[in-house]
Image (spheres, rainbow, N blue to C red):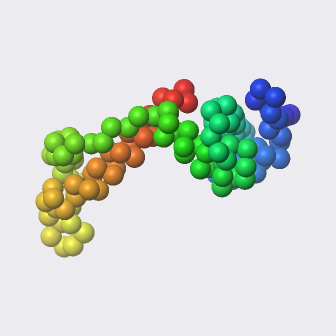
Amino acid sequence: MPIFVNETEIDDNAVFSEMQYHRGENMEAARDTAAQALVVRELLRQEAARQGIDGATGSDEALDGALMALVENEVSVPAATSEFCKTYYRKNKDRFRASDASSSVLPFEMVEDNIRDYLHTQSTREGVRSYIL
C-alpha cells in the first residue's frame, strides 16, 4: 500500500528498496523503519524545495546536497571549546588508551581534535533529531 506525503507518493518498491539499509527484529519492523526513513526524507526534501534550496528536486546526489544545506540552515551546532573537550576527556579517559602493549592513556593534546570532531558529530545528530521531531 503506498504512502502519501502531502501530494507525493512513496510506493512499495521504494520501501522494499530502502529496507536493505534498515535492521529490524523481523521483516515488518525493517519495512516500518524503511518507510519512516523515506517519509522523513520526503518531508525534508519538501522543506528544502519550499526554501528554494538548489538540488531539492534533482538526482539523489543533488538531493543529498540539498538536505545537507537544509540541515546547515536550520540546525545550529556550537563548536566544542577546548575546556569542554578537556572535561569530556577527563570523564572518559579509558576511551583514549594507546593501542600498543602499554595501553597507557593518551595525552589530551593527542586526542583533542578527535574529541572535538566526535562532539560535533554528536551535537549535529542531536540537532537533526530535534529538528525532525
User: Residue 99 is drawn in which quadrant?
Assistant: bottom left
Q: Is residue 11 visible in this depiction of the protein? A: yes
Q: Residue at x 34, y 50 (%)?
A: 118
Say whether residue 80 is left or right of residue 19: left
Say whether residue 71 is left or right of residue 62: left
Q: Give the percent coordinates (x, y) of residue 18.
A: 71, 48
Which residue lies most toward the right here?
1
Q: Residue at x 35, y 45 (%)?
A: 120
User: Residue 36 is drawn in which quadrant?
Assistant: top right
Work out whether residue 23 or residue 124 is closer to the camera in this orientation and state it. Answer: 124
Vertical order, 29 against 13 (above or below): above
Vertical order, 37 against 118 (above or below): above
Work out whether residue 52 or residue 41 is closer to the camera in this orientation and state it. Answer: 52
Q: Is residue 91 visible in this depiction of the protein? A: no
Work out whether residue 97 or residue 28 is closer to the camera in this orientation and state it. Answer: 97
Which residue lies most toward the bottom here?
101
Say whether residue 2 is left or right of residue 122: right
Q: Give the percent coordinates (x, y) of residue 65.
A: 59, 50
Q: Residue at x 66, y 55 (%)?
A: 61
Q: Give the percent coordinates (x, y) of residue 34.
A: 68, 42
